[in-house]
């Protein structure tokens, strides 16, 4: 998403964000890093825009632009596995109007950077038996990230409406483009969860001696069909992708959304089937 939007930003405004992003990407790839993507703000009153909130820190904002960088204040919430990641990539979560310019900000930082505080609650305490990885020991760690007046150097800033109000409109494009890639990646990873549920459902049906009955076979085929359709939507959206001016492929929007929506809606039916067959 950054490769698409920083390029468009530079083309329109004559800035140098795309070069910054490419240098950051090279650093990221050369060092084989992992990032946590922090988009979701606390948001407060959903019917109010960021600048209208009673508490100005409901959305992450820039409080100062200096010659060498910016200072940011606020938080991001429900961010997955940040304590396990090397880097934190911060993005806006919605469209911003001219008065929201301080909130139009995107940047990257190491997760242990000065002033970045991680409040984490691991969600599972079962140790992995067969594979060594941090989340296997501590569980999935959703994180509340506090930015306590944090300095971000220029080479790590990808959008700053505070320093240059013309950039504000690009917050919305970046928010939607990131969400688009996130939905697309979901069509790849979600079928694996369905397969785990389907396998557990098939196994418990076998334990209960009901695996050959028609209602069980119908339910299992429903699970398999969902996994395959979600994956097919993602694959098809990749095949119908288009090249953005920066050269990055952008998956087809309608197919991506169709697959992501199906996955999001069916997960509750999938748990229902597993609970039903488990007795
Ligand atoms: C397990 C998990 C992992 C996550 N991981 C990440 C992550 O790694 N990175 C990240 O950035 N985020 C992450 N998130 C956050 C996730 O992206 C958000 O929860 C999601 O976008 C919804 O935002 P929200 O929780 O603020 O709810 P909202 O979008 O505010 O929705 C709450 C309700 O309010 C309604 N609503 C909202 N606005 C309006 C309005 N203007 N008018 C009328 N109704 C409205 C909605 O329709 C909904 O019914 C994660 C969330 C979960 C549960």
Image (spheres, rainbow, N blue to C red):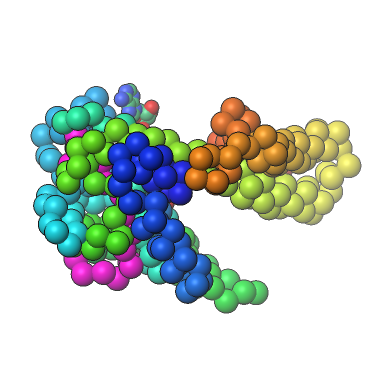
| Residue at 39% from the left image edge and 51% from the top image edge | 18
Does 104 sit above or below residue 23? above
Residue 154 percent location from the top left of the image: 25, 60
Q: Position of residue 103 (x, y in %)?
A: 21, 41
- Relative height, residue 60 to residue 168 (above, below): below
Percent position of residue 192, x then y: 67, 51
Q: What residue lies at 64% left-to-right and 47% top-to-bottom?
A: 188
* Number of numbered discs on residues: 0
Which residue appears at 45% of the width and 39% of the height? 177
Relative horizontal placement of residue 262, taking residue 65 as reference (left or right)? right
Task: Give the farthest residue toward the right.
Answer: 212
Please say if 135 is above or below 76: below
Name the residue nearer the viewer: 168 or 53: 168
Q: Is residue 85 left or right of residue 113?
A: right
Residue 198 x %, y %: 72, 47
Q: Quadrant of residue 128?
A: bottom right
145 left or right, relative to 193: left
Is residue 112 found inside the magenta-colored segment of the image?
yes
In the picture as drawn, the residue positioned furthest to the front comes out as 14
Which residue occupies the extreme top position in the image?
47
Ligand 1, seen in the image, is in the quarter at: top left
Residue extent of the magenta highlight:
100-115
Q: Residue 256: say if magenta.
A: no
Residue 252 figure quarter? top right
**Quadrant holding the C terminus:** top right
Residue closer to the observer: 109 or 85:
109
The residue under the point 71% across, 49% down is 195
């Amino acid at each position: 998403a950054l490769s698409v939007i920083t390029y468009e930003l530079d083309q329109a405004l004559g800035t140098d964000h795309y070069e910054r992003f490419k240098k950051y990407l090279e650093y990221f790839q050369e060092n084989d890093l992992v990032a946590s993507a922090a988009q979701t703000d606390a948001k407060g009153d959903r019917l109010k825009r960021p600048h209208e909130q009673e508490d100005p820190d409901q959305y992450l904002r820039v409080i100062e632009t200096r010659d060498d960088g910016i200072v940011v204040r606020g938080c991001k919430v429900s961010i997955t596995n940040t304590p396990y990641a090397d880097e934190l990539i911060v993005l806006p979560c919605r469209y911003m109007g001219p008065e929201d310019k301080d909130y139009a900000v995107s940047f990257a930082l190491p997760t242990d950077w000065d002033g970045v505080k991680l409040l984490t609650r691991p969600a599972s305490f079962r140790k992995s038996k067969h594979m060594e990885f941090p989340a296997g020991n501590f569980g999935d760690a959703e994180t509340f990230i506090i930015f306590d007046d944090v300095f971000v150097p220029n080479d790590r800033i990808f959008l700053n409406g505070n320093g240059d109000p013309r950039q504000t409109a690009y917050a919305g494009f970046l928010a939607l483009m990131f969400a688009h890639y996130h939905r697309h990646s979901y069509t790849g990873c979600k079928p694996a969860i369905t397969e785990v549920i389907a396998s557990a459902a098939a196994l418990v049906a076998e334990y209960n001696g009901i695996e050959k009955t028609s209602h069980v076979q119908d339910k299992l085929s429903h699970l398999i069909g969902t996994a395959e359709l979600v994956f097919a939507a993602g694959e098809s959206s990749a095949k119908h992708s288009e090249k953005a001016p920066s050269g990055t492929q952008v998956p087809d929007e309608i197919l991506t959304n169709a697959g992501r929506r199906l996955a999001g809606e069916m997960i509750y039916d999938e748990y229902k089937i597993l609970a039903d067959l488990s007795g």
